[in-house]
Amino acid sequence: MELTHFNEAGLPRMVDVGAKPETKREAVAYGRVLVNRDVFELIKAGDTSANKGNVLATAQVGGIMGAKRTPDIIPMCHPVTLTGVDITFELNDTPDNNGKYSVEITAAARCAGATGVEMEALTAVSVAALTIYDMCKAVQKDIAIENIHLLKKSGGKSGEWTAGN
Amino acid sequence: MELTHFNEAGLPRMVDVGAKPETKREAVAYGRVLVNRDVFELIKAGDTSANKGNVLATAQVGGIMGAKRTPDIIPMCHPVTLTGVDITFELNDTPDNNGKYSVEITAAARCAGATGVEMEALTAVSVAALTIYDMCKAVQKDIAIENIHLLKKSGGKSGEWTAGN
Amino acid sequence: MELTHFNEAGLPRMVDVGAKPETKREAVAYGRVLVNRDVFELIKAGDTSANKGNVLATAQVGGIMGAKRTPDIIPMCHPVTLTGVDITFELNDTPDNNGKYSVEITAAARCAGATGVEMEALTAVSVAALTIYDMCKAVQKDIAIENIHLLKKSGGKSGEWTAGN
Amino acid sequence: MELTHFNEAGLPRMVDVGAKPETKREAVAYGRVLVNRDVFELIKAGDTSANKGNVLATAQVGGIMGAKRTPDIIPMCHPVTLTGVDITFELNDTPDNNGKYSVEITAAARCAGATGVEMEALTAVSVAALTIYDMCKAVQKDIAIENIHLLKKSGGKSGEWTAGN
Amino acid sequence: MELTHFNEAGLPRMVDVGAKPETKREAVAYGRVLVNRDVFELIKAGDTSANKGNVLATAQVGGIMGAKRTPDIIPMCHPVTLTGVDITFELNDTPDNNGKYSVEITAAARCAGATGVEMEALTAVSVAALTIYDMCKAVQKDIAIENIHLLKKSGGKSGEWTAGN
Amino acid sequence: MELTHFNEAGLPRMVDVGAKPETKREAVAYGRVLVNRDVFELIKAGDTSANKGNVLATAQVGGIMGAKRTPDIIPMCHPVTLTGVDITFELNDTPDNNGKYSVEITAAARCAGATGVEMEALTAVSVAALTIYDMCKAVQKDIAIENIHLLKKSGGKSGEWTAGN
C-alpha cells in the first residue's frame, strides 16, 4: 500500500491522469457547524425572513466560489472543469448533549473529466462552514466545525461509493 | 444581539474597522483528521524517514498558503498583512473508540492590524486538513475532518481569549 | 499634462506612493443595470421575500469580494488594506424612455493608506453589476450596464471631491 | 418565468450544465469610456506613437487577463477553457453633447464547452474600461463607463443571437 | 516572420486555438539555482534526513502550484486542464569555476488540449527556483537562477521537439 | 548556520516578523532573455514603432502584476503592501559567443513594511522574462532565461546591500 501522490524521490506530484477516460463524475460531501441557541436563532431568522441578514446565502456563495478555487488551494489537486455545484443547509433545532444546535451543510459537485471531484465538494463544505463561522464569531467565540466527510461519489473507474456501506 | 456583518438592508458587508487601533494580534486554531491504521502508518513513515513521501510537509505548505488566501476565500474577511504563520502536527497513535487514529493540527497566525486573525488560523487548519485528505484518499475513502475550532486569541479590544475558560 | 502611470521609456509602472502619508480614505462609486419588467420583478421578489432567490444578495457578495481582488485585476493598482466595503441597491421602478427599469448600485470602500480606493469602489460596482447580469441573462439577453462613475472621494492630498461640483 | 441560478431553497447555485453538449461558442461584448479632450489626446498619442505611454496596450492586457479570471470573480460562473480572447479599441473623436470623447471597447471570447462565454466577453470589456479609468484618473476625475452590453453570441442550443434584432 | 500573439492593431491577444485538435501534450523544462557551499549543504541535509527542514519539498509544492497558476500569471497564456505535473531535483556537488554548487530542477507538465504546456513547465521551474531562493536568502544574498529553458515537448501539430537537436 | 524558514519539527513556516520595525525598503533584481536575431528584431520593432506588436509592453504588465502575486506564488513569502514597482528593459544588440542577443530586464520593488521585497523584484523579473518567452516561442523554440539575481536592496536591519561588493 502506498500513497500515489509522491514521486520516486519521495516528493509530492500531481498524479498523471492523462490515461484515464473522461466520465461524468459527482461527489457529495457533508459537514456541520455547531452553534449556541442565540446564533442558531439569528441564522434561522435570516433564512426565513427577507432582509434580516442571511448568513446562509453568504455561506452558499462562499462555498460555491470556494469549490472553484480548489486547485488553487489544495496543493496536488488537478484543475477541473466543474459543470455544477450546489449546497443545501439544514437547520437542526434539536440541541446535542452540550446544548449546541447544528447547521448541516451538504455540497454536491459535478464534472466531466479524468479525476473525481471529492475535493471540490469537501472544499465547498469547508468554505461554507468557515463563512458561517466568520459571520457569527462576533456573537459566539466557541463555534466548532465538525464531521467533514464524503457522503458519496460516482463516476470513474471505482464507480459508485457511499459512506457507511 | 445581532450580526454585525450585515448592513441596514440586511445584506452582508465588510465591517468598517477603520476606527480600530492597529495592535499585535494572534490566533491559534485546532482541528484533526481521523484516519485508519494504514493511512496513519504511511503518514508517520513520511514524517520520520527522509524521502518516503511526507504528507505533513505538503499539508504544511498548503495550510500556510491557504492562510494567505483567507480574504480571497471567506467572503467578508478583511485583507490582513500577516506577519507570521506556523502549523504543527501531532500524530496521536492511540486509536479512538472506532479504531481511528488522529492527525492533530494546530495553526497559529499573527498580524499587526485592526482585525483579528481567527479566520486565517482556522483556514490554515482547514486547508492543511483537506490536503491530508487529498493525499490519502486513494488509500482510504472514509477519512473525516473533526473539531475545527479556535484555541485562543490575543490582541485587540477584546484582549486574551482561551477556549474552555 | 501627462499620465503618471508611465515610466521614462513609456511603459506602464505602479506609481511610487512611498512618500505619501497614510490617511483615512473613502471612495463611493455608482452604476446601474437596465433590465426589462420581467427581470425587474424577479429581482424585487427575491429582495423582499425569503427564499425566492435573492439576486442582490449574490451580487453584494460578488461585489465585495471583487473589491478585494482589485489589485489582482487592474494592472497598475496598488495593493490596499481595505478597512471596509459596503454596497447598497435601489430598485427604481419608474421605467425610462425605453421601458427599462434600473437596479442602482452604490458601493463605498474605505482604507487607511497611501493611495485612494476609487478603483476598489468602481470594481465593487462593476462586479456587482456583472453578477446581476449573469444571474438574469437566461431570462433577458439585452441587459445593459450604464453610467459607472465615481460619486465622491475623501482623504489624501487632494481632499474631498464630489461628482458634479 | 424564473431565474435558473437558484435551487429549491432559493439559494444560488452553479447551474448543472453536464448534460449540455460541448460546442464552439463565441460572444462579443461592447462598452465605452467617456473622457474629456485632454485625456482623449493622451490616449491617442500613446496609441499612435512609440513609447509615449500606451494606455490601450495596458487595458488590452488587463482585459484579456480579466476574461481568464471571470469564474474567480463572478460568483455563479462556470469555469471555462477559453480558446481565444481579443479586444479592439476605437477612438471616436466626435464629441457627444456633453463634449465627451469615447474610447469604444469591443471584446470577443471563444471556447469549446458546455456554457457560453458572454460573461468572459463582458468581463474583458469591464476590466479594460476600469484599466483605462485607472490610468487616466490622475488627469480627469469624472470619467464614466457606459453602455456595457452583449453585441452577439453564437454556439449552444440557443444558436446565433445579435443585439437589436 | 511575425509574432502571432498580436492582432491587427498591434495589441496582444490570446491566440485562437479553437480549430486545433485536442491531443496529449507534454513539455519538460530545466533550470538551476547556484548556491554557495553552506547553502548547498543545508539543502542536502534537508533532502536526506527527516525533519531537518526540506527546502526541496517546499520548492516542489511551490513549483507544482505555480504550474497551475500559469494562465493567471502569464498574460496571453491559455487556460489549460493539466493532467499531471512533476518536478525532480538533482544536487550537483561538483562546484563550477566560481565555486558555486547547483540545484538542478527539471519539471514535466502534461495535458490533453489544444495548446502546449511549455509555459506551465517553465513556470514550475521558475517558481521552484524562486522558492529555493526565498528559503535560503537569509543565509546567502547572491544566489542566482540560471539557464531556464525547454528540454523537450511532444504532442500537437509540431510533434516532438528536443533541445539541442 | 541554519535556515530560518523552518520550525522545530523541520517543517516550513512563515517566519514571524511582527517584532521588526516597518521601514522603507527597496529591492532591485535583474535577469535576461537570450533570443536569436529574428526574435530580437521583432521585439525591437515593437518597442520602437507604434502598433507593430509591443512584446515589452506586455511583459511589463505581466511582470508588475506578477510582483503583486508574489505571496500567492512563493510559499513562505509574507504579504506585502507594495508602494511601487517598475521594470526597465534594455535591448543589447551585441550578440554573445553563441550569436544570441539579450533582452535585459531590471525590476525595482518598494514597500514600507517589516520584510524586504527581494522576492517581489525577482518575481517581477521572472514573470516578465516568461512573458517574453511566451510571446516569442512560436518563432524560436530554444529561448533561454539567464542570470536572475538581486542587484541591490536597502532598508531593514541589514541596511544597504549591493551585488558584487
Image (tube, coloured by chain):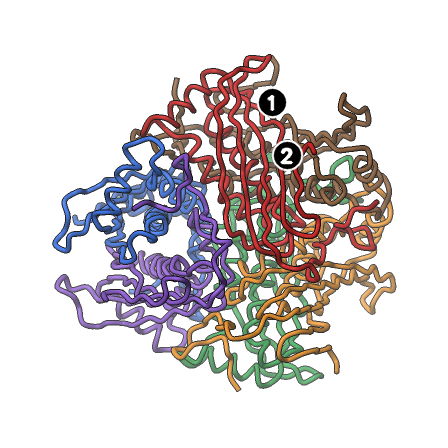
Chain colours: A brown, B red, C orange, D green, E blue, F purple
Counting from the top left corner in percent of width and height, residue F58 is at 41, 65
Question: Which chain does the residue under circle 2 lie in?
Answer: B
Q: Is residue F154 above or below residue B134?
A: below
Q: Which residue is mark 2?
A: B149
CB atoms of marks 1 and 2 within 8 Å:
no
Mark 1 to mark 2 CA distance (whole Å): 26 Å
At horizontal 52% and vertical 61% (from top left) the residue drawn is: F81
Counting from the top left corner in percent of width and height, residue C21 is at 57, 73
Depth check: give the residue in front, B51 or C140: B51
Amino acid at dot 2:
His
Crowding at mark 1 (Cα within 10 Å: few <14, some 14-19, many 20+): some
Left or right, D129 with respect to E136, comes to: right
Counting from the top left corner in percent of width and height, residue F124 is at 39, 61
Counting from the top left corner in percent of width and height, residue F67 is at 44, 60
Q: Quadrant of residue B8?
A: bottom right
Residue F100, can we see it?
A: yes
Q: Quadrant of residue D146?
A: bottom right
Question: Which chain does the residue under circle 1 lie in?
Answer: A
- The answer to whether marks 1 and 2 sit on the same chain is no
Depth check: give the residue in front, F33 or E158: F33
Residue D60, can we see it?
A: no
Q: Quadrant of the C terminus of chain D?
A: bottom right
Left or right, B157 with respect to E161, comes to: right
SS assignment at label 2: strand
The dot on residue A152 is 1
The dot on residue C7 is none
Amino acid at dot 1:
Lys
Q: Is residue E128 above or below residue D27?
A: above
Say which of marks 1 and 2 sits in front: 2
